Image (spheres, coloured by chain):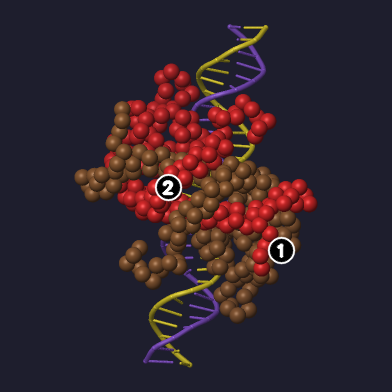
Chain colours: A red, B brown, C purple, D yellow
Amino acid sequence: MERMNTAPDSAAGHRWLTDEEQRVWRAYLHATTLLEDHLDRQLQRDAGMPHIYYGLLVGLAEAPRRRLRMTELAMRAKITRSRLSHAIARLEKNGWVRREDCPSDKRGQFAVLTDEGVEVLRRTAPGHVTAVRQALFDRLSPEQQKALGEIMEIVAEGLQPDEAGADLPWLR
Amino acid sequence: MERMNTAPDSAAGHRWLTDEEQRVWRAYLHATTLLEDHLDRQLQRDAGMPHIYYGLLVGLAEAPRRRLRMTELAMRAKITRSRLSHAIARLEKNGWVRREDCPSDKRGQFAVLTDEGVEVLRRTAPGHVTAVRQALFDRLSPEQQKALGEIMEIVAEGLQPDEAGADLPWLR
DNA sequence: GCCATCTCCTTGAAACTTGAACAAGTCGGG
DNA sequence: CCCGACTTGTTCAAGTTTCAAGGAGATGGC
């Protein structure tokens, strides 16, 4: 039952994944979807918002004066401006974020974390950190944590829409 | 500017992430969202469906007689039955999947991959594999690939809704 | 100053996801 | 056989995301 474990060029000229690569890829898909779902549910239950929205609040909390321009926040969160627009509208309804005009650019808007927003984070952050810890860090050795960090940095760098290689479009 | 790099119990009794853990966690979030977005777009463009739908077709293609019960397919893809129901409805409209009644259980339905479905996979799989390869495997050393696989298996196991520990509810 | 062009952000509609509720079918004890 | 408990898969409504389009303001060459 031994299968070939190399990925030779197929007749069509592309390489399939080796058996081992396939195992890794499936484990990756499996784990990342489970983790994302897990955290989404945890936050939906405890904070009343999906994981990505929580990340937006965190992003604002870390910014000077608890505010960021929409485009800046969208880039940090790796989402489109459109998506952010809808998301901020929802968070505004919750009273956790408020919009403010940018004085120096009349097109611009700041998303500003409100005191209620800060309070929500203060109340829910510990539970979220615990969830991340239990699902990830508590299960990995220090070496594995280090390796994971390095791997993810490599992957992220390769997909970065800006920065590295942005002016070398033929490499993309 | 040196910050403490341990995560002592806070007054409230929970542990924060260390600076290093935080770096790893952000790299993880960053990389996984970029990769997911990348593959979603790649498949939307080349195959006309999101990544998860593609995974459903793959799941069916690998099953005996290219068919699976809805619940079984949902479990393999790690999605809810509700979501699967909608997804199959859409794939059915595309002509890539068809439903069939289960003879032995009148409640049951099979999702069956059609010939058109097979054809879509045949046409789009190479491009998808290439995208995965370029984004992930081509950038990692063999050691890193191995480490990634092990890490992801550990994480997945810890979040598995069934299997390990399912009958030991007090451990969850 | 003017205009083409770009950037910032929003909008609306369509697609997708979620969670709860539901009809229909199965199962097992009594 | 019958009934309660469970399973299977769908549906509905509400929420989220995407994509294309667009309004408003900034920018720079001429």
Instruction: Please tell me the numbered disc located at residue B114.
Output: 1
Q: Amino acid at mark 1?
A: Thr
Tag count? 2
- Residue shown at 76% from the left, 47% from the top: A13
- The residue at the point 45 percent across, 55 percent down is B155
Residue D2, image quadrant: bottom left
Give how far across and how far down residue A93 sits, in percent: 38, 41
**What residue is pinned by disc 2?**
A143
Q: Is residue B154 left or right of residue B62?
A: left
Residue A39 is left or right of residue A15, and the answer is left
Q: Quick one: label 2, few (<14), some, or many (20+) residues within 10 Å? A: few
Rendering quarter of residue A92: top left
Cα separation between marks 2 and 1 = 46 Å
Name the one closer to the observer, B164 or A144. Answer: A144
User: Which is more foreground, mark 2 or mark 1?
Assistant: 2
In the foreground, B81 or B157: B157
Q: Mark 2: which secondary structure?
A: helix
Residue B44, visible in the rendered structure: no
Which chain letter matches label 1?
B
Q: Quadrant of the C terminus of chain B?
A: bottom left
- Residue found 49% across the figure and 55% down from its top: B150
The answer to whether residue B25 shows anywhere in this view is yes
Which residue is located at x 58 percent, y 73 percent?
A: B108
Image coords of residue B54 (percent x, y)? 63, 54
**Amino acid type of the residue that numbered disc 2 sits on in the rendered structure:** Glu
Q: Quadrant of residue B23?
A: top left
Q: Nearer the viewer, residue C11 or A162?
A: A162
The image position of residue B165, as x and y in percent, is 40, 67
Picture quarter with the N terminus of chain B: top left
In this rendering, is residue A72 above or below B147? above
